[in-house]
Amino acid sequence: MAETTDFELDELPENIGPHVTDLVRVWHEARAEDPEQIVPSRDILTAERLRPWIDDITIYEYMPLKEDFVVRIDAPSIVALNGESFQRASPREIDMKYGSCLTAALFNTMMCGQPTFYHVTLAVRADQHWLRVLLPVRTRNRDGYPVDQILGIRFDYEYQYQI
């Protein structure tokens, strides 16, 4: 098993690029369009609105009967980078393989109903640092029942520690 360190950030780092801040702004704009809802609906936060990030988005769907998530769509850019897909797998499998805390981060994001940000370093490849952005959304299944999802996007980023 690889070892990964990931820690939650209180907010987006100041030195992060506009590609990341634009994504979070789009989430907040979608949220504001229907203030009655806790998180944005996928009817509002559509694939068209997410077009600049579409190849980088992994969709994690909450499975209440299993009290777990499943990877509904694995980001094509991540599949190409890692050479493997976790589509239809539990994020727990990713945690077991890489020693990460993805499952806990997904639950945290779902419970707080706000975007969350994590700095992640993969120990076996010291040059792999990234910012994980998790965005909670809601869709509906074929029967019209609500389904909670988390959009996960990974951006290359080396955290600058403040002393």
Image (spheres, grey):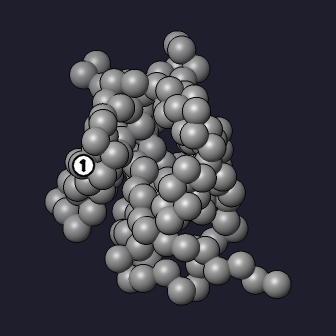
Q: Is residue 142 visible?
A: yes
Q: Image check: 158 left or right of 146? A: right
Q: Quadrant of residue 139?
A: top left
Residue for point 40% across, 24% down: 89
| Within-10-Å neighbours for mark 1: few <14, some 14–19, many 20+ | few
Q: Image check: 125 left or right of 27? A: right
Of 146 and 119, the residue lying toward us? 119
Q: Return the residue found at the far top.
A: 65
> Considering only vertical position in the picture, is 154 above or below 88?
below
Of 19 and 147, the residue lying toward us? 19
Residue for point 28% across, 42% down: 83
Residue for point 26% across, 54% down: 77
Provide residue 109's location: percent of width, then percent of height: 59, 47
Of 139 and 50, the residue lying toward us? 50
Q: Quadrant of residue 10?
A: bottom right
Q: Is residue 24 visible?
A: no
Q: Image check: 27 left or right of 80? A: right
Provide residue 93's location: percent of width, then percent of height: 50, 26
Of 155 and 53, the residue lying toward us? 155
| Mark 1: amino acid | Ala
Quadrant of image for the C terminus: bottom right
Residue on which the image places disc 1:
80
> Considering only vertical position in the picture, is 140 above or below 105?
above
Q: Quadrant of residue 111?
A: top right
